[in-house]
């Protein structure tokens, strides 16, 4: 941000920056609107495929996909999953189950492989900045959820 401010200072006399809301100028950022294909090189595809091996995933997909209120299916869920389901914390979009918290909606992860990947990317990766424990936990909290999450 500082580099942009320094670069813009030479034009400051001749220009005024005016904020326009996205719904006014109707100019969406092309990269943020670019959908990825559901192919094996898409990380969401890999997460979806590994999630299908989990019985809780199958039950939640049935419950959320049809707005089904079958109590036998609800009772078949593990306790942590059942509590989150009864609190209305799960959403299903494009076959991926999301866990909703007070402030955000994050992807639900099932396999241990993905938990380790998330932890690596949020802490050990060169792009993560190797943050402290509390900042790493905050970062993970904003992108992932799993049943044993504290």
Image (cartoon, rainbow, N blue to C red):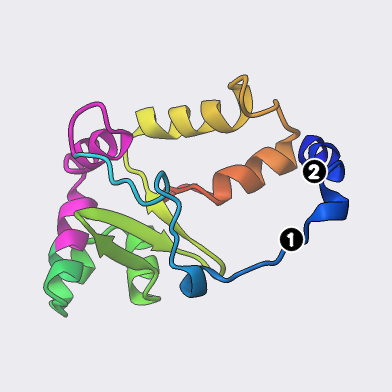
The circle drawn on residue 17 is: 1
On the image, which quarter does residue 74 sit in?
bottom left
Q: Residues within 10 Å of mark 2 (few under 14, many from 20)?
A: few
Main secondary-structure element of the magenta-colored stretch: helix
The residue to which callout 2 is attached is: 8
Indicate left or right for 50 with 115 as reference. left
**Whole-percent x and y of residue 22?**
51, 68
Identify the image quadrant of the N terminus.
top right
Question: Mark 1 and mark 2: span between their CA atoms?
Answer: 10 Å
In this rendered view, identify the residue nearer to me: 20 or 76: 20
Q: Relative to 77, say whether 38 is above or below.
A: above
Judged from the image, the secondary structure of the residue bearing numbered disc 1 is loop
**Whole-percent x and y of residue 112?**
37, 32
**Whole-percent x and y of residue 87?**
40, 76
Whether residue 148 appears in magenta in the rendering, the answer is: no
Q: Residues within 10 Å of mark 1 (few under 14, many from 20)?
A: few
On the image, which quarter does residue 110 sit in?
top left
Judged from the image, the secondary structure of the residue bearing numbered disc 2 is helix
Instruction: Say whether marks 1 and 2 touch (CB < 8 Å).
Output: yes
- Tell me where the magenta segment starts and ends, as one range: 38-61
Residue located at (43% from left, 34% from top): 115
Q: Relative to 13, say whether 66 is above or below.
A: below
């Amino acid at each position: 941000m500082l580099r942009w401010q320094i670069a813009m200072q030479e034009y400051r006399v001749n220009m005024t920056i005016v904020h326009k809301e996205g719904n006014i100028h109707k100019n969406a950022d092309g990269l943020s609107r670019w959908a990825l294909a559901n192919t094996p090189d898409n990380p969401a595809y890999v997460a979806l495929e590994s999630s299908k091996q989990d019985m809780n995933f199958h039950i939640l997909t049935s419950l959320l996909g049809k707005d089904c209120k079958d109590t036998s299916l609800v009772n078949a869920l593990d306790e942590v999953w059942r509590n989150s389901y009864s609190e209305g914390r799960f959403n299903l979009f494009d076959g991926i189950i999301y866990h909703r918290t007070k402030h955000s909606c994050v992807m639900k992860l099932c396999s241990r492989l993905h938990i380790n990947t998330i932890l690596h990317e949020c802490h050990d990766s060169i792009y993560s900045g190797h943050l402290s424990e509390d900042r790493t936990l905050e970062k993970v909290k904003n992108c992932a959820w799993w049943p044993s999450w504290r």
